Amino acid sequence: MRKVDPARYRAKRRSIMDAAAPLFATHGLDGTSTAAIRRAAGVSSGALFHYFPSKRAVFVALLTDEEGDKAERVAAASSHDDPWKALLELVEHLAALAASPVAAGLVMEALRQTQRDPELAETLETDSGAELEVLTHLVARATEEGRTEPVLSPEATADWIQTLIGALFLRAATEHDFDATAHIRDLRSLLSRLLGHTEG
């Protein structure tokens, strides 16, 4: 039996996801066929289903960045020596996807699908909860080390940070001339002021 190379397996899944993203963003989940994904990814039907059991699975993987490096970044941020630096880097990484040309379409489609798919809504809520947990941890550590002086509790502060990131995605989805890159830069400056950042 041939041994599967994990890195190559993840890379192939990622390539399929990247090919499917603009299709979902433009035509939605229901309007995108597995045949269209297969053609865009340049794979056979059997190969597509080898990596994903359904087109919905591809869609969910995109929304949770399943084959991206978000999970690794979240884990690394949690144990970073400098909680303030880790917090800003994580916020920028989570917000950076708003600058993607397919972000708007994916966000709108995700909102539509979660209204009628409780399982998807729960999956995204779990993913969001994991992010919130690490953001809270970093704010708490930065506060304990005297790097920040937030007005709110670490939990409430992290919740607002996540809300601001979410707002970037909503604006990217509803404003044609929205400059996500500029707003992500502004978000970094805003957090420094709101959290009363002091140099360590």
Image (cartoon, grey):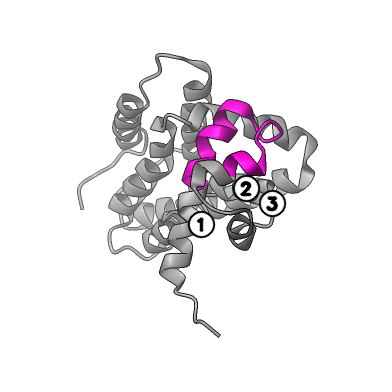
In primary-sequence order, the first of circles 3 and 2 is 3
Q: Position of residue 181 (x, y in %)?
A: 32, 29
Residue on which the image places disc 1: 13
Direction from residue 17 to residue 119 in the image, left or right? right
Name the amino acid type tagged 3: Ser
In primary-sequence order, the first of circles 1 and 2 is 1
Extent of the magenta region: 17-37
Q: Residue furthest left?
A: 199
Q: Residue furthest front?
A: 44
Q: Position of residue 161 (x, y in %)?
A: 46, 38
Q: Helix or strand or loop: what does disc 2 sit on? A: helix
* The quadrant where residue 108 appears: top right
Q: Position of residue 163 (x, y in %)?
A: 52, 34
**Discs 1/2, front:** 1
How many numbered marks are there?
3
Residue on which the image places disc 2: 60
Name the amino acid type tagged 2: Val
Give the main secondary structure of the magenta stretch: helix
On the question of residue 156 being in view, the answer is no
